[in-house]
Image (tube, rainbow, N blue to C red):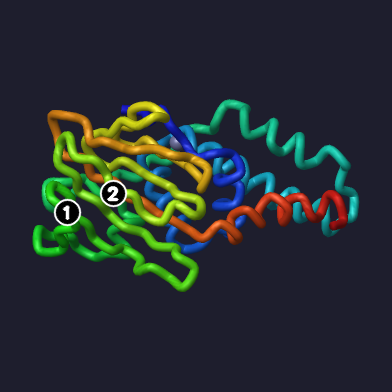
Amino acid sequence: MTPTHHPSDALLISYASGSLGAGMSMVVASHLTLCPDCRGRVATAEAMGGALLDSLAADELAPDALERMMARLDEPAPPPRPRPPARRDGLVLPTPLLDVTGPITDGSWRRLAPGIRQIEVVPRDRRGGSVRLFRIAPGSVMPHHGHRGIELTLVLSGSYTDELGTFDRGDFAETDGDTHHQPVADAGAECVCLIATEAPLRFRDLIPRLMQPFFGI
Ligand SMILES: [Zn+2]
């Protein structure tokens, strides 16, 4: 199944340029294992990043370079490089996640609330950022957790629905502190999802940082 919800261009560019925090970067990388389209967009962004650095080095950067770079992200993606996810504990979990957690067994999960179990993948940092893997029984409402900053959600099994739509395996949701939503695991199967939160400053500084070379700010 091809995912229908994807990371924004800004997020993919910051991933490709290495300016995302480790936790968020891992969640994006996990989506990429399930999404040929976004793998192609990242490959394009990486290629353009190299060209951009060459241009900057040559001091010949055109004023509309960022605009053209963003437009090129909408061009057809190059052929995907398949990278099959690993299968553990009856779940098919992405390799970038397993690289951090190691093998996941039934004993890895901690009960958070009735119908909800979690694994703390990256413990909460000083600024409130964390990455957690949730396992949510059908019909259960996901916990609300520190929605002060950017939140990335990747569905790995089952599905959930909220005000933004229905999210299936591989689908990606990117929300910020202004988004109010109440995800509910859909009936039929348990929903497993990976959720990264990060304090707002780090991400919101990103666009100005990207723009900096173009505007001399
Ligand atoms: Zn995608």
For residue 189, what is the image quadrant?
top left
- Asked if marks 2 and 1 touch (Cβ < 8 Å), the reply is yes
Image point 54% across, 33% down: which residue?
78
Residue 215, image x and y in percent? 86, 50
Q: Residue 39: horizontal and vertical position, in percent?
A: 48, 40
The amino acid type of the residue labelled 1 equals Ala
Q: How many marks?
A: 2
Q: Secondary structure at mark 1?
A: strand
Q: Is residue 6 above or below residue 202?
A: above
User: Which residue corresponds to mark 2?
Assistant: 143
| Image quadrant assignment for residue 142 | top left
Closest to the observer: 19 or 52?
19
Residue shown at 37% from the left, 40% from the top: 82
Taking 194 as reference, is 212 left or right? right
Identify residue for label 1. Answer: 113
Can you say which quadrant of the picture contains the C terminus? bottom right
SS at circle 2: loop
- Say left or right for 89 vs 151: left
Residue at 69% from the left image edge and 36% from the top image edge? 70
Please state the quadrant of the image where ligand 1 appears. Answer: top left
Quadrant containing the N terminus is: top left
